[in-house]
Amino acid sequence: MIRALYNWTMALGESRYALYALALIAFIESSVFPIPPDVLLIPMIIALPHRAFLFAFVATIASVLGGMFGYYIGAALMDSLGQPLLDFYGKAAQFDQFKATYNEYGAWAVLIAGITPFPYKVITILSGSTGLDLGVFVLSSTLARAARFFLIAVLLWKFGIPVRSFIEKRLGLVFIVAVTLLLGGFLMVKVL
């Protein structure tokens, strides 16, 4: 099953729909989808290393736009759903204090979440709900997502053939590590 999924993503990476699929996944991952775009980005770069930087650019732009949608979700639903809940439970004052603290360090939160396996969508929605300055949010998101996707692009562009051989020989191990990182990011959300 893992081999079939790998072969499918490699074929998709070489197809004429690859950029559209990557853009869609990068967009929805930044606001609601649990699977990171790396799942498609990496096989696409391995399959077509000469397009690595185009793929990274598309993933970056789509991810930042998706992050802005996540920000909108946080901002739009906070007034209609979040605030009444805070009021009902008597936690509005605590949220105001959290909001001030978050907005003071929000740029760093966005940068860290944008680069690491921490679910970026959580930070995009949280940034909208706390009213983090949109300019700060977009700048931090752009820097973080570009750093993440272009680092992957550079490494795979330079070392793609050995990486592809490693992945194909140890596909099960690579899958386990990827799933562990993904689950670790969601665990961080629960703990923090």
Image (tube, rainbow, N blue to C red):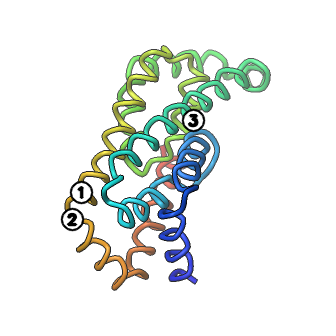
CA gap, disc 3 and disc 1:
25 Å
Q: Compared with residue 45, is residue 55 higher up or lower down, i.e. above or below?
A: above
Element class at badge 2? helix
Q: Are marks 1 and 2 in contact (CB under 8 Å)?
A: yes
The residue identified by callout 1 is 155
Q: Residue at x 78, y 26 (%)?
A: 81
Amino acid bearing label 1? Leu
CA gap, disc 1 and disc 2:
6 Å
Counting residues from the start of the chain, the first of labels 3 and 1 encountered is: 3
Amino acid bearing label 2? Phe
The residue identified by callout 2 is 159
Residue closest to the eye, 58 or 112: 58
Q: Are marks 2 and 3 in contact (CB under 8 Å)?
A: no
Res 75 → quadrant:
top right
The residue identified by callout 3 is 66
Counting residues from the start of the chain, the first of labels 2 and 3 encountered is: 3
Q: Residue at x 55, y 39 (%)?
A: 122
Q: Compared with residue 159, is residue 148 higher up or lower down, i.e. above or below?
A: above
Residue closest to the eye, 138 or 155: 155
CA gap, disc 2 and disc 3:
29 Å
Residue closest to the eye, 135 or 181: 135
Task: Locate residue 155 relative to residue 80 in the image: left or right.
Answer: left
Badge 2 density bin: few <14, some 14–19, many ≥20, Cα 10 Å: few
Q: Residue at x 31, y 53 (%)?
A: 152
Which numbered disc, 2 or 3, marks the residue closer to the eye? Answer: 2
Amino acid bearing label 3? Gly
Task: Locate residue 95 relative to residue 144 in the image: left or right.
Answer: right
